[in-house]
Image (cartoon, rainbow, N blue to C red):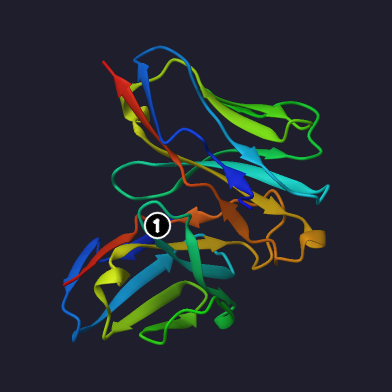
Amino acid sequence: ETGVTQTPRHLVMGMTNKKSLKCEQHLGHNAMYWYKQSAKKPLELMFVYNFKEQTENNSVPSRFSPECPNSSHLFLHLHTLQPEDSALYLCASSQDVHPAVNSPLHFGNGTRLTVT
Amino acid sequence: AQKITQTQPGMFVQEKEAVTLDCTYDTSDPSYGLFWYKQPSSGEMIFLIYQGSYDQQNATEGRYSLNFQKARKSANLVISASQLGDSAMYFCAMREGPKAGNNRKLIWGLGTSLAVNP
């Protein structure tokens, strides 16, 4: 298996539930990212990890809790979410956390999250 | 001010014809890179093509080419011989060099929805 894999593809959860999104990359990259994609907004960078260490948290509410046990796996733990958190959550990876100008990000298929 | 502007929310093209998707950008950093991504309804962001600010020639990748006009700060994506499978959202993104001081994050446009008609 190659590339970046995200599970589940779709998730419906109530505001009191706890769930987790999973991301796995098979590219040997050192940096992993969580993005949120909402309608009519640019992609929002949520978290950045470099060699398992979190290097960025872009003012994300604490109801989103990332975990990176190793350079290949990234989780996003969700609890007490709000309906406005409904969005497509994309995981991405890159060779380095401060990529060269010409280095693209590699994305997974995303998890479509609906909070009811 | 928006750093990446995609002025076309939606575009239609007839199968086998060429289509141009617009992207203008704003940066004062002399070193930057421009990317185009395709996002089908499945959700995955697929990297298509890259253009560097110092590249002398326009980038090409198969049916994709970039019309890079540096003085006008535009990097339009040209898709030749459109196929039904080209129907998707297309995003333009920019990474600035270290002088911009934003940790080389990708800056994204809002995207253009392309529909290819049979």
Q: Which chain contains the residue that carries disc 1?
A: A
Foreground residue, A2 or B104?
A: B104
Q: Position of residue B117 (x, y in %)?
A: 28, 19
Foreground residue, B48 or A88?
A: A88
- Quarter assignment of residue B17: top left
* Residue A35 in the figure: left or right of residue B94: left
- Residue at mark 1: A108
SS class, disc 1: loop
| Residue type, label 1 | Gly
* Residue at image location 72% in from the left, 56% down from the top: A100
- B9 over A67 or under it: above or below: above
- B113 over A44 or under it: above or below: above
Q: Residue furthest front?
A: B1
* Residue A59 in the figure: left or right of residue B41: right
Q: Position of residue B93 (x, y in %)?
A: 58, 47
* Residue at image location 34% in from the left, 15% down from the top: B15
